[in-house]
């Protein structure tokens, strides 16, 4: 089946620094990717919809200047957490849909554990 | 590690039929369990959840019970509607990880 990768799988950074997380669709093209955030024992929260070649669409309450999303190609979307703080520590997951056919199934990346110290 | 196994689709039902989508999990701890739904072209939406054994999550007529003895969290609905056509994902979450099932596409025909 389709594969979505994320890199890095875990990252620890100091408060005030920026961290970039990559989401790649490995064997299909994805015009749309989704970024989610999850706190321990809680459900996923959709942060934004990443659209190839255009600006991301952010969910209400998500700071677009803090969580920068770039979808420069049909196989890569990046999420940059700028000026990270401990409250940004979380599990970030991306997903992508193979739009080559009629399927709308989402394929999930394995997630990135961000810890801000 | 933790994992989720979900009934493969696609599933096609007539309107007002009974729905069951099976989900079983393996986990070393005591995870929370979730069902997510995704409508065409949209992101995931949380459908329901259960955080401990014997809890029943319910929403929009859907139900699922956290069964520790059978490590299951099957999704059920008594009478599906055309608007329920979507992809459904079972998931588990613990403090360190989150795992999703592969998803089950449901198509409800009028």
Image: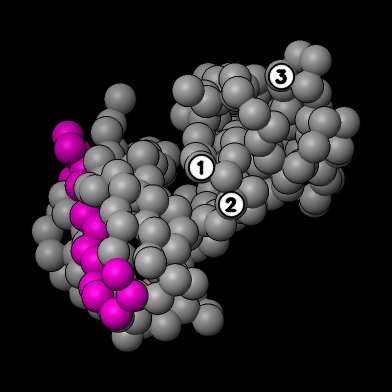
Tag 3 subunit? B
Tags 2 and 3 on a common chain: no
Looking at the image, residue A12 lies above or below residue A111 = below
Residue A117 in picture, x, y percent from top left: 38, 67
Quadrant of the rendering where the C terminus of chain B is positioned: top right
Residue B96: mark in rendering:
1
Residue furthest to the top in view is B70
Query: Which image quadrant is residue B66 in?
Result: top right
CA–CA distance between discs 2 and 3?
20 Å
CA–CA distance between discs 2 and 1?
7 Å
Q: Which residue is mark 2?
A: A40
The residue lying toward the viewer, choosing from B84 and A54, is A54
User: For this view, does B38 lie left or right of residue B73?
Assistant: left
Query: Which image quadrant is residue A80 in?
Result: bottom left
Q: Which residue is mark 3?
A: B71
Tag 1 subunit? B
Give the magenta-colored segment's residue range: A14-35
Q: Which element type, helix, strand or loop, lies under badge 1?
A: loop
């Amino acid at each position: 089946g389709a594969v979505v990768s994320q890199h890095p799988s875990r990252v620890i950074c100091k408060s005030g620094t920026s961290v970039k997380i990559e989401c790649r669709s490995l064997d299909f093209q994805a015009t749309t990717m989704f970024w989610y955030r999850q706190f321990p024992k809680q459900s996923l929260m959709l942060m934004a919809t990443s659209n190839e070649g255009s600006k991301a669409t952010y969910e209400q309450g998500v700071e677009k200047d803090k969580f920068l999303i770039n979808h420069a190609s049909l196989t890569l979307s990046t999420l940059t957490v700028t000026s990270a703080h401990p409250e940004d520590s979380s599990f970030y997951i991306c997903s992508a849909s193979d739009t080559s056919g009629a399927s709308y199934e989402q394929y999930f990346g394995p997630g990135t554990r961000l810890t801000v110290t | 590690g933790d994992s989720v196994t979900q009934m493969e689709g696609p599933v096609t039902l007539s309107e007002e039929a009974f729905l069951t989508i099976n989900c079983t999990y393996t986990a070393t701890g005591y995870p929370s369990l979730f069902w997510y739904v995704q409508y065409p072209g949209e992101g995931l939406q949380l459908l329901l959840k259960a955080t401990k054994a014997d809890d029943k999550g319910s929403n929009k007529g859907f139900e699922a019970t956290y069964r520790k003895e059978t490590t299951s969290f099957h999704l059920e609905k008594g009478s599906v509607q055309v608007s329920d056509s979507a992809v459904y994902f079972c998931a588990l979450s613990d403090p360190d990880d989150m795992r999703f099932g592969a998803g089950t596409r449901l198509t409800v025909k009028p």
